[in-house]
Image (cartoon, grey):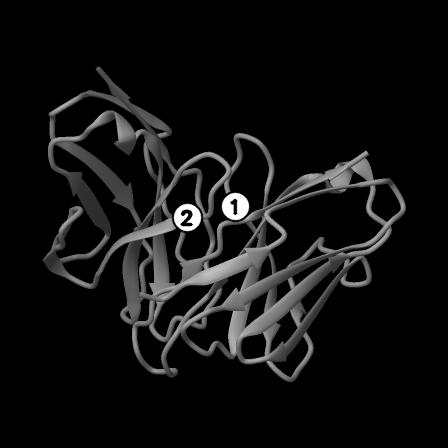
Amino acid sequence: GAVVSQHPSWVICKSGTSVKIECRSLDFQATTMFWYRQFPKQSLMLMATSNEGSKATYEQGVEKDKFLINHASLTLSTLTVTSAHPEDSSFYICSAAPGTSGGQETQYFGPGTRLLVL
Amino acid sequence: LAKTTQPISMDSYEGQEVNITCSHNNIATNDYITWYQQFPSQGPRFIIQGYKTKVTNEVASLFIPADRKSSTLSLPRVSLSDTAVYYCLVVARGGYQKVTFGTGTKLQVIP
């Protein structure tokens, strides 16, 4: 089946540093990937849509200069949290859909990355 | 994006069948209904997807009435390991469209 991985699974960093999170589609290609953030006991909130070879599309209220997204290949998207602060501590999850456009492809989610900013 | 409404929480005893209903009144013609399961500190896991009538797989069944304004996820004979949050999503055809997560339903299975 379609598998999406994320690395690292958890990261602790000091305030002011930058953290990069990778999202990979292991057995399929994905021209579009999505990045979500989930705070404790809350639902997933879509942050941005990552498009291979072009700029990401950010949801309202998400700072594009703070959350840098790079979709360098059909199997890899990265999210960089720049100058992280404690309020950025959260669970970050990516998703991707295999197949070609036009079908009812299902989005598959990565295992998530727990970020703790001290 | 079609909005979904689900019960916030449900309790069930082990071995019982659980039905979780989702309301999506403004579903569009090209939209599919997809259900995900999420355990704490894990990404959502795909359970089932359907367009109309009934869909069944090895894990669950999905019932969708003719007007498609609601759907019901049915989990047969739940076990303690089914304790999780279940999300109902309305997904546009193509898989490349962004989706909005609702509150989900926190299912607690009781021994």
Q: Does residue A108 appear to the left or right of A62 in the view shown?
A: left
The residue labelled by disc 2 is B44
User: Which one is in front in this view, the residue at disc 1 or the one at disc 2?
Assistant: 2
Query: Going 59% across and 76% down the picture, which residue do you hit?
Result: A51
| Chain hosting mark 2 | B
Examine the rendered structure and indicate whether residue A61 appears above or below residue B72.
below
Residue B1 visible? The answer is: no
Examine the rendered structure and indicate whether residue A91 appears above or below residue A35.
above
Crowd around label 2: few <14 · some 14–19 · many ≥20 (10 Å): many
Query: Going 16% across and 46% down the picture, which residue do you hit?
Result: B60
The amino acid marked with disc number 1 is Leu
Where, by quadrant of the figure, is residue A76 drawn? bottom right
The amino acid marked with disc number 2 is Pro
Query: Going 37% across and 83% down the picture, which residue do you hit?
Result: A100
The residue labelled by disc 1 is A44
| Chain hosting mark 1 | A
The residue lying toward the viewer, choosing from A79 and B65, is A79
Q: Secondary structure at mark 2?
A: loop
Mark 1–mark 2 distance (CA, rounded to whole Å): 9 Å
- The quadrant the N terminus of chain B occupies is bottom left
